[in-house]
Amino acid sequence: MHRRPAGWRAARLADDDDDAGARRWGSTPPATAPPPREPHPTTPPPPAAAATALPLAAACAAILLSSAGRTVFSVCLLEIQAALHITPVHLSSLLNAFTLGYAATALPGGALADAFGGGRVLRAALLLYSLATAGLPAAVDSRRPFAATLLLRFLYGALSGIALPAATALISSLPPARRSAGVAAVFASNNLGSALGLLCGGLVPRLGWRALFFLVGIAGVAVALAAAACLPPDGARAGKARGAALRYVASRGETYGQLALLTWVHSVLNCAFFMFQNWLPTYLSNQLGLNISSSATLSALPWGVMAGCTVLAGRAATAMQRHGWPVLRIRQLMLSLSCMLPAACLLALCLVDSAAPATALLVLALSTHALSTNGYHGHIQDVAPSASGRLLGFTNTVGMGASMLFNVATGSLVEATSSFSTVFMLTAVLYASATILFVRFARGSPLLELA
């Protein structure tokens, strides 16, 4: 009699169990291990780092030069006033012309960027507003200098208003894991441009204000032409988006509610930012007795620190996302810090009357305000990635209008009270309202897309 090898019964029972389990789930056990799956032939490979880094670098350069050109005009205000022989009232008209132009094109600029690609629109805007910057001395020396300068300032504002929505649309084309870093890089460039423009103020006695405008303008033209020659087209997405309409992903009621929330938060951030940018020199000079006109470094310090904190905030948001933090929780945390820490600094400023602690509090307020880039602006990328340019264009348009009204209110309050304390307390209240509403009501689900 043939004897089976020892252990055959246990092996047979194990095989029977496997067969039974396979039949239970409606399949048969494979005789051999399945071959490794090949990637689907239609799945595109992840974009190379250089393919995303170069367009982002060009966008950062465009935003930096836009901010620098805007700040250089503020630095050279007295020289331009003397060259035009105008009163302070006419000078304020030149400042308002830029603001009106900027507010007028944010929304259509976002639509153009979503339709034709953020990179293409941004490069065109950079070329045109750089030409406007370089041409300002010619406008001042023309037959009708005030009218020509007023028109050129409006055009510069209108072309600059396209830049931020276009950069936002470009960021939305990046892989999701790189968007926080992209947002941080663009807004750090914006703050760095302000610092650079203030530092350039030290060159006015040596080069003259006309040469300064010419150099900044020519630098922008060179960057725009180099980017147009070296960078590839924006890709298929821009072509598909051309002529596309906005589609509600969420219900209309939820979308409108979230849009109202985002508009309020953006308005608060704009009011605070432009309060710092427009009134910081007056506060340092009138209330603290500092001579900032002779110290370009002191004027540029808060904006340089703000740029560095923007980059750090982007890296922190990316690291938190990598470690499993919910994206909405990251946005809420960043927005809360970007509002409540500056609010605390502003309230502390009401109790301070010496230069050293006041300067430290201002630097801290501006540096922590920079966290909003990965709070609010990162959230825009989350809820409307394909329509981020249009969404930001709308909220920024309303936000610029709010900042203009707040600027008027600031001047009236300072004139009535001879102090910035009321303005600082009001700004702190606005900061707190944005924090409470965003943490309580913000939703991370998609709202809009291009259909």
Image (cartoon, rainbow, N blue to C red):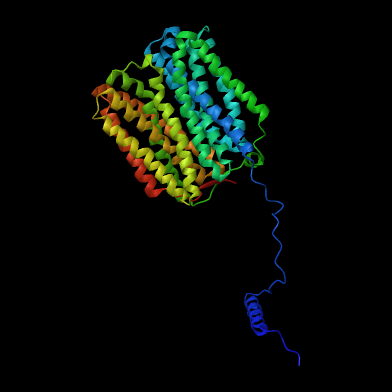
Q: Position of residue 329 (x, y in %)?
A: 43, 49
Q: Position of residue 384 (x, y in %)?
A: 52, 44
Quadrant of the rendering where the N terminus is positioned: bottom right
The quarter of the displayed image where residue 244 is located? top right
- Above-or-below relation of 367 to 12: above
Q: Position of residue 438 (x, y in %)?
A: 39, 45
Q: Nearer the viewer, residue 150 or 378?
A: 378
Residue at 45% in and 24% down: 194
Taking the image as shown, residue 259 lies to the left or right of residue 138, namely left
Q: Nearer the viewer, residue 422 or 241?
A: 422
Residue at 34% in and 25% down: 408
Residue extending farthest to the right is 1
How many marks can you see?
0
Q: Nearer the viewer, residue 24 or 105?
A: 24
Q: Position of residue 208 (x, y in %)?
A: 48, 9
Residue extending farthest to the bottom is 1
- Above-or-below relation of 174 to 301: below
Residue at 51% in and 7% down: 141
Is residue 402 in sight in this rendering?
Answer: no
Taking the image as shown, residue 55 lies to the left or right of residue 323, namely right
Is residue 304 in sight in this rendering?
Answer: yes
